[in-house]
Image: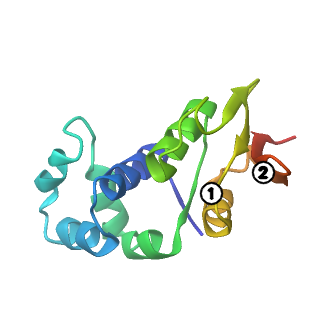
Amino acid sequence: MQHITLMEAYAIETLRSSGYSNETILEKVRNDEMTDFKSADSSMDYSGLRMLESGNFLGNILEEGYQVKFLTINGLTNLIRMKYGKKQDDDYRLEDFTVSELQLGDTDVEVLGNLLSSNWEMKWTDKGVTIFPAG
């Protein structure tokens, strides 16, 4: 699993949530057409994607997934919103740095578990997924 920064994850998930396919993201980065990405979020810095592609990692990251190097609670809740469209209080609870009662399908749970940095743990409960600080 390739490790990426939180900002690189934000860039990928912003594009995905705006309808860009993995193939289109990769093609536009390879062809240096990233100005098109500004339609997804004009304030986002997409230059990290070029760096990932220069190391020949971007295609694998898009297809196989990634792990965020270090993930804060705000970063975690932002990724849950961006990647799954889930909102605090509507779709899950947040209390004392713990996300609970998050409802996701099996595949999404596996993907989320893989992208969590090592400072987080995840478990299933009868009310959904719970994510909490490791240790």
What residue type is disc 1 on? Answer: Leu
When the figure is inspected, residue 13 is found, relative to residue 57, above or below; the finding is above
Q: Which residue is mark 2?
A: 122
Image quadrant containing the N terminus: bottom right
Q: Quadrant of residue 98?
A: top right
Does dot 2 land on a helix, a strand or a loop? Answer: strand
- At x 28%, y 75%, the residue is 23
- Residue 131, how many percent across, how many down? 75, 44
Marker disc for residue 112: 1
Q: Observer-nearest residue: 4 or 88? A: 88
- Residue 114, how many percent across, how many down? 65, 62
Residue 66 is left or right of residue 30, and the answer is right
For marks 1 and 2 on the same chain, the one whose residue lies earlier in the sequence: 1
- Residue 2, how many percent across, how many down? 54, 66
- At x 26%, y 51%, the residue is 47
Q: How is the image coloured?
A: rainbow
Q: Are marks 1 and 2 in contact (CB under 8 Å)?
A: yes
